[in-house]
Structures are given as structure tokens and as C-alpha cells.
Amino acid sequence: MSEEKYIPKSKLAEWFDSRLPLLSLSHHLKSYPTPKNLNYWWTFGGILTFCLITQIVTGVILGMHYVAHTDHAFESIEHIMRDVNYGWLLRYVHANGASMFFLAVYIHIFRGLFYGSYKAPREIIWIIGVIIYLLMMATAFMGYVLPWGQMSFWGATVITNLFSAIPLVGESITTWLWGGYSVGNPTLTRFYALHYLLPFLIFGLIILHIWALHIPGNNNPIGIDVKKNSNETMPFHPYMVMKDITALLVFIIIFFWFVFFAPNALGHPDNYIEANPLVTPTHIVPEWYLLPFYAILRAIPSKLGGVIFMFAAIFVLVLLPWLDTSKVRSSIFRPIYRKFFWVLVATVILLGYLGAKPPEGIYLVLSRIATAYYFIHFLILLPVLGRYEKTDQLPMSISDPVLDKPGLIDKFKKAAGKYEGDNVKSFK
Amino acid sequence: MLNLLNRIILTIFISIIVTPSFADEQHSHGANTNYLNTDWSFKGIFGTFDRASLQRGYQVYQEVCAGCHSVQHLSYRNLSEEGGPEFSVEEAKAIASQFELEDGPNSDGEMFMRSARLSDKFVKPFPNVQAAAAANDGAYPPDMSVLAKARAGGADYIYSLLMGYEEPPSGFELDDGVYYNKYMAGNKIKMSAPLMDGIVEYADGTEATTAQMSKDVTTFLVWAAEPHLEAQHRMGFKAIIYLIILLTLVYMSKQKVWSRFNSKEESEEEAFDKAERMVTEYEGEDPKTFK
Amino acid sequence: MSKKLMPKRRDFLFTATYTIGAVGLVSAIWPLIDQMNPDSSVKALSTTEVDISAVEPGKTITVLWRGKPIFIRRRTKQEIDEAAAVDLKDLKDPEKDSDRAKNPEWLVMIGVCTHLGCVPLDNKGEYNAWFCPCHGSHYDTSGRIRKGPAPTNLEIPKYEFVNNNIIKIG
């Protein structure tokens, strides 16, 4: 499938397109060549776009009813839940939508890690992605403050206090963030303004993310370059569109299950208690999607150190394209990396679990081990593996018949294993 | 090397799954979290409220709890709305008119008292949190509008707490005005046992046992916290059925569309056959030998 | 040849998918629109009671109902006679005064000009009753439009006399 140039069908279309090439753009998006072997893990880009749009639409609507004032915020949420037509639906979609957004983004990120999508020539896509992820966390955090429940208030207090760890100017920065001497009304109103603004920045970055993607084209499960103008690719529309929608619907079913049947399962009960600056909840925990970083923060025994490590845990992702020195992208052909990938997944899940636990006893020990491993994975294992790992033979092209059926790859490898040594090279 | 790694991964995953079970025990600070088991009609995807129970629950709330606990986000009109206790509008009006609240200012600039209307929020027993705490020995009786959502365990917790008053075990020290409750965190609660058999008289003749009243008032509180629960369940069921139908259609369409592309290629079957022949050649007669 | 036959079945499948998808999309959009309609707390505030015992003849009081001014005027005998004497043929929006005031002494109207929503002034205009300063609509002592751009008479809300001193609006 080659990507043909857009040829206007009418004089009007030609007139318009020569002035503003929207029609060319739409033609490009439709005919954009995608590798035909993309699996369902590749549908999360589309799912994430859906998530962002859902959050923006429901968010703008909630903004029509929400009152950003410490005296009225909690009450206005109850007003939305009780009085506004379909208000409960819109709020539950927005609240659970945030969780689903992060679920999808984590799958998207780990897919990139597994298939080496961050490697040349896709470093910029990856880095923009990390920035989007950072902004998502900031947006989600500020959004969680808006209902002005106990977790909102104390979460805001704890997170903004992180900045007080900065030497010399820390105190002034927190005071500046709060607009007072504690989290209060000025803090709430600025968080509301920023919570409204950041999604649009994310939207802009997503356009850049997709733009950067469309230059080299998609990576694929095999991880070797596809020939763009060949039968190795298929046009985005209708093939990938249909596949994306299929996956999206499965995603929405799970999403709606939470919205209608377990809308508060992912939230914390304490956030239904109105904020009270005099009483701290027994355990302050962020939303589940921030827990791994919260665990890292608490694993480090020094205040400043914790903050540094927490931010470093995200920043290390920016450097990932250069830390991973392996030339082979897909971990299908990297037997050792593949194992470590799963260890990393397990570590992050473990960190998430530990983030919800009090930082004491065995939890603290485990958090430290997991934090250490997290950094070892990126800073030591990846550079070393890239140098010494013996990767499997790459196929010549993604249309290698062997690859059409996933199980066959393993069979081939097993078969090859028997002859390991002398004729593994000749097998192919 | 790889086998060792496999084992490590497996161990980590298993430990993640197993640790929560022992961890939670240790974490609960002496409160019993094995809540009493009750069949709630509102649980499950088709869950609806038991109207009679809601109406009785309102009565228990009004006669027992309302002296100290507000439900400030509930309005009298909610009592007659669909999906709630569904009192008739007249009944709800009559209920509202029993309460007085301050309104104003009038044209003379003065505040005045009037009886409540359907559009008013439930009248609070105390004007503010401080007054409520002061009247209750320093412990603020929490507003109960969203109580069922504000406590881990929800309905089960509230029900268990109401049923959980006991004599303290020997050696357990209690200050004056503090009571022992099996389900309260730390087992100390400042609210004395609010219910006892026969404390209210149900109009519908139901016997007002502590268990019955606890169940009714808990149902009422769950509704107060989630007044649209029934609509939510109804809509959710429809939405998910719809999505499953649409998913089926979309998936079939997708398969059709993709078959267009695939038919242009070398037949997939042929490719598989070829590949499988190659595998068989290497595997020999018994594929099991490769492990 | 089989390819020629295929399109029909495909078309049916695609049409069904599109149609069902469109139905879902439309139903998903409705809550997004309906949320802007008056919510249940606003709808519940639909009645207000007004004490009229202190209103002198020839005076108007203005109260707020659903965010709009309500004129309650205790009309003088002369005003009532004037209003009743008008020939319906002279009216742009013919309505009998007796249909507009349940009790001739009391005229209860929504104080919003039917032209573009300004609030008319009382004891003004050619009929010495109500006059809208925005675009010059003149209303008579029964609140009927007599001159100017307004298309209809001042609207009468739903109201009732609870007793001699109290009017319940809504």
C-alpha cells in the first residue's frame, strides 16, 4: 500500500486545498501506511485519544456546574451528583475516565518498552510521550484536589510540600504555590484554572506526538523497518480504524462497568469527607496511578533525596533511547531483555502496591529494593544488555510466513534450540 | 540463567498477589473488618432499593439520628422522587412542614422563621460544625449525606457498626462517654448505642428490632449517598448490552474489511501450511521431545 | 464471481454497524446537552409566597420569582375601570381584563417586556401604566401591549390567593 498524493476531485476542493491543505491532511491520515502486523497492543494510541477527548468534554461540562471555592466546592460536587441532569453520570465518567486514561497510558508505555518503540528514529515521539505523561500526572493530581475532600486537601498539602525540600528557596516556592501559608482557597482556584488548561496543552502535544510518529511511521511487533510502499503496509483507514474501534469498544465496556457498577472502587472513601485542615486522615494515599512514584518518594530516607529520586524515575525515561544500546528493537528477539522487561513490570506493580501501604517494616525494605531495581534496570541493565546480549536472528521482513502465526515463532526457536551451536545460523 | 530469571519473576508476581492478604490484617489497628453479612437489595447490577425499608429507614433517621446527625445535601423533595423512598408529594410536603428554618431577609430586612418546603435542604440539628461538636462532648457527629460512600466497607460497615456494641473485654479501658464497638477503628466510639429494640414504632407493623432498624437506616443512608443508584444500574445494564451488540457488529465488519486485504495476498492458509511443514521437519515425530 | 455477490452482504453488515453506532452516539450526546437544562433544584424553586397586606392602592411591589421580577399591583378603581372599558378591537393582543386579573383589585404579572426582556417602568408611558424604556413599548393598566415593538401582553404567571393577604406564585 503506497501513500499516494492527494488529488482533488473538484475545482472547489482544489481551490480550498491549495489555500489550506486540510483535505490533503485528511487524505494523509486516511491513507497513512501502517505495518500490517500491528497487534492489539497498538490500539492504545487511539484509545488514549478517546480518553483525552472524553475527559475534556466531560470536564468542560463539569466546569459549568462546579464552584471553585473552598466553601462551596464539596457542596457543588454533591449538587452535580444529585441535582444536575445526568450530573452523576458525567462526574463518574470523568472520575473513572482519569483512571482508565492512566490504565491505557501504562499499557501504551509498556508496549513501547517491550517492542523498543523508543529507539531510533523514534526518540522524539518517545520524549514527547514522556512529557505528555508528566502533564497527565499534574492534571490528574490537580483534578483530584477540586472536590475538596479530605484526600484532596491532604494530598495537595503533601505533594506541594515536596517542593519545600528544595534548598534555600523551597519555603518560598511552597508559599508561592499555595498563595498563602497553607493549602487554601487561592490554591484551589489556581489548581482549577490549571486543571482546565493543561488538557489543552496535552492535546497540542498529542498532535506533535502523532506528527512525529508519521515521519518514520509505526514501529511493529517484529521491530524491523517495513518497506512503506509494499504489501507490508496497509492504509490506516479503514483497516486500522476498524481494529482501533474494536479495541476501543472492549475498553469502553470495562470503563462503563466501573462507571455504572463500581464508580467509587478506584477512589478513596475519605474523599467523601469534606476537607478539614485540623484532621489528617490516617493514611494519605494518592490515586492508584501515582502510587509507584509515591513509593519511591517514601523509600528514600531523606526529604530532598526522595523528591529527587521520584522525579528522576520519570526523567530516566527521557534518556531511555540512549540508555538502551541494543540495535534490536523488539524484545521478541531479545531473550534476556524480555525477562528483565517482565521483572520491571512486576517491580512497578510492586511499587504501586507498596505506595498504598504505610512506609514501615517489610514495606519499607521492599520499597527500597524495588526502587533500587527500577533504577538498576534503566541505568545498568539496559546499557550492559545492549552490549552483551545475544539476540535472536531477525527475519528478513515482516511478511516472513513464519511470522503470520505467533505460536510458530516459538516453535521455530525451540526447534532451533536443539541444534544450538553448530547450525543455528544456518537455520532460517 | 533464563530459568533462574523465570523463577524470580514468578516469585515476585506471587508475592505481590499474596502479600496483601496478610498485610491488611495487620493494618487495621484492631478494628474488625469482617463485617456482618447482609443481603442488600441494592447490591448487584440489577440492585434496587426496598421502598418500604427506605421509608422505615427515614423514620429511624428522623427519630433516632437526626438529633445529632445532619444530612445537609438531601432535600425534602428527594423523599418523593423516583428511585428513593417514594413518599407521595403530599407526604413529603407534610414531612417538610414539620421543620422550621430561618429565611430572609424580608422587606424590613429581618430574618424570619418559616416552615420548610419541598425545595429546602434537610434542616440541620446544629447551625455549624463547632456547635455540633460542642453539644456532643467535642466529637462532631458527621454529616450523613454521603456517609455510606465515605467509609470503607460502605453499607456493611454502617450496619455492622450499629450492631457492634458490646461489653468491652476485660482489661479494656474506656473513658467516660466512650463506648466499646467491635467494628469501630480502635474499638472506641463516642456515640452510645443509638438503637435498641422497640425504640421506634413502625407504621407498617414491622417489628422494630435493632437488626431491622439497622438494616432500614443503612438502606436509607445508602440511598442518601447515591440517590440515582437505580437509574445508574438501569442505564449501565442497557449501555453494556448495547456495547456488546455494537462490538460484535464492529468486529464482524472489521473481519470483513481485513479479509479484503488478506485475499490480495498469498493465501494465509498456504503460508501456514508451508511454515508448519518446516516446523514438523525439525520437530521430527514427537514434538514433546523439545521442552 | 463470488466477489460480485459479496458486496450485498457486506453492505448490510456495514449499514447495520453504522446505524447502531449512530444510535449510540446520539444517545451518548443527550446527557451532554440535557445537563444545561434547569436542574432539579432549580425546578423545585418554582413557588414563592408573597405577603401583600401592606400594599396600598395604586402601588406596585416587585418580587423575584424564578429569577424574574413579578409585578403585584393593587389597582385603583379608576385603573380597573379604564382596563375594563377598552375595546378588544383596539388591542394588538386581544385579552379581556377579567381574564388577566382573577381579583380585579390585584394584577399579578411577570415584569419582563415581551419584546427583548427588559423590565418596564410603572406609572409611565401613554397609558400611565407600564412603559419599557429599552425600545418604547407602552402597556395599559391591565399590562396589555398598546403601542411599540412588543408583540404580546405582559405574561401572567400561575398564581393563587392562599388567603386575603398571601399570594402564592408558581
Image: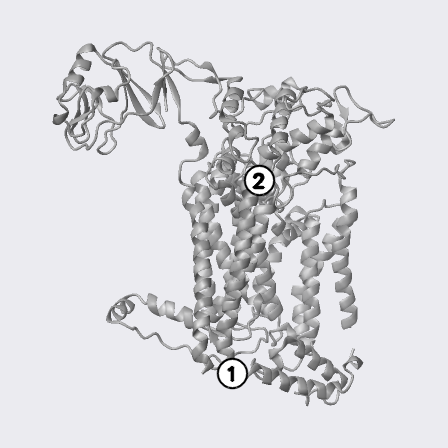
Residue C96 on image: x %, y %? 20, 22
Q: Residue B279 placed where, x, y %?
A: 69, 85
Q: Quadrant of residue A311?
A: bottom right
Using the image, determine if residue A270 lies above or below residue A248. Answer: above
Disc 2: which residue: A152
> Which mark is on residue B265?
1
Q: In the depicted view, which residue is nearer to us: C101 or C8?
A: C8
Residue A344 can be seen, yes or no: yes
Q: Is residue A360 above or below residue B138?
A: below
Q: How many marks?
A: 2
Residue B202 in the image: x percent, y percent?
66, 22
Residue placed at 67% from the left, 57% from the top? A348
Q: Secondary structure at mark 1?
A: loop
Closer to viewer: mark 1 or mark 2: 1
Type of amino acid at the residue the image marks with label 1:
Glu
| Left or right of B220 on screen, residue A90 | left
Q: Which quadrant holds residue A201?
A: bottom left
Under mark 2, the amino acid is Ser
Q: Is residue A259 left or right of residue C112?
A: right
Q: Quick one: A422 or C108, which is closer to the camera?
A: C108
Q: Do marks 1 and 2 share a subunit?
A: no
Residue at the image position 60 percent from the left and 74 percent from the top = A329
Check disc 2: other Cα within 10 Å, few if <14, some if 14-19, many if 20+: many
Residue A156 figure quarter: top right
Coloring scheme of the render?
A: one colour
- x, y percentage for residue A360? 75, 45
Q: Quadrant of the C terminus of chain A?
A: bottom right
- Specify the label residue A212 is tagged with: none
**Residue A236 appearing in the image:** no
